[in-house]
Image (cartoon, rainbow, N blue to C red):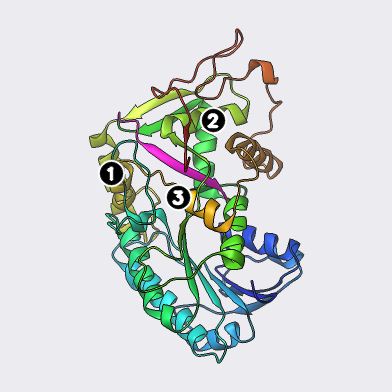
Amino acid sequence: MAGRNVLVTGASGFIGKRLVRRLVSKGYQVRCLVRPTSDISDLKLLDCSFITGDVVKTPNLLFDAVKGVDTAFHLAASTHLVRSRDLTRVNTAGTRNVLEACAGLTSPPTFVFVSSISAAGPNDGLRLLTECRICNPLSEYGFSKADCELWVREYSSRLPVSIVRPPIVLGEGDRQGLKMFRTIDNWGCHFVPGFADDLFSVIHADDLADALIAVAERGRRLDIEHASRGIYFAAGDEAFTFAELGNLIGTALGRTHTRIVRVPKPLMWLVAGMNELRGRVTGSPCYLNLDKFHEAFAGSWACSNQKLTTEVGFRISATILQRLEQTVEWYRQQDWLKRKQPVPPGHRQPLPGQPPTTSSIRPSSTVAQIHKVGK
């Protein structure tokens, strides 16, 4: 990055907190844009400053927020609302407001937009998504992110912008992923949607934070003449089936075996529909709604990180199992998971593709290998 002054919108979120922590550790002067209702107790322990505002409701405050910054990381967004169709309206408005504030400066900052693999849409079979793929979202959340990307591209002639698309993000502080960890920890089972072994990419929040910083420092910027320039998938080096991911989480939790429970599509649709209805009645959205149901059965959500590694020089600093063990340890320290004595390494179930030991059980996933990404 050209300078050391940085703005992070959505700083109090799961990924935002990890990014702020990483930036502070690297010596950046970080300004956090947070809503009045945000929990910033963790952020207050760091050497950063705060501006209270909302990217949608208080756009006038954004001009003060971006003033004097060299880079703006835009993470603020809604992932699910009571009415899914409102996602595009809310997320697009917030992104446009931050873009306009940045473009209004005499020396606009570099703008790094955190999009999602949902904006690109799924792929079939074992093929990996690349940045050359034309966006084909199928969920309301995916449409909202794709629409935001169009606005980011629209402003690319007025300020330097890059787009980063993460897949599934796990790590400390993630309450959505916690539900999956708890199910495996308490009951020893992992629920998999359907009977197909589609591939998924995963990245830990710390690795995503490092990828965002690397793109800001060394990445290319959007160019209207080159459709995929300045766009990066930020994913781990391996892709997994959802069953394999459950087995890996079980290993990180110290379990010798994780039972894979396949949920038929009609049953999943029924649960998602009931959650959707309950969310509208109570005014509190549920994560597993019809929008997420469509994504779960859409096909492969695996992407290549080759462009990020070759153009930016980014490298994942730890294996996914190490990151999952790190996450489990944090969950237990916070009492989000029950505290347990870890199973000795010789008794753990092997990684997919490794032969079982005499004291371990082979993963129940039908795909007996870890799929290398971007190689």
Q: Please report whichever mark, 1 or 2, sits nearer to the chain's N-terminal start.
A: 2
Q: Mark 3 falls on what kind of element?
A: loop
* Residue occupying the point 44% across, 71% down: 222
Residue type at the position of mark 3: Pro
Residue 41, visible in the rendered structure: no
Instruction: Give how far apart the Cα atoms at labels 3 and 1 are.
Output: 14 Å
Q: What secondary structure is the magenta-colored segment mainly? A: strand
Q: Please report whichever mark, 3 or 2, sits nearer to the chain's N-terminal start.
A: 3
Instruction: Give how far apart the Cα atoms at labels 1 and 2 are.
Output: 23 Å
What residue is pinned by disc 2? 248
Residue type at the position of mark 1: Ala
Q: Position of residue 190 (x, y in %)?
A: 45, 30
Q: Which residues are magenta?
A: 195-204
State which quadrant residue 3 falls in: bottom right
Instruction: Give how far apart the Cα atoms at labels 3 and 2 are.
Output: 17 Å
Residue type at the position of mark 2: Leu
Q: Which of the numbered marks, if any, corresponds to residue 298?
A: 1
Q: Which of the numbered marks, if any, corresponds to residue 28?
A: none
Q: Is residue 86 above or below residue 3?
A: above
Q: Position of residue 257 (x, y in %)?
A: 53, 19
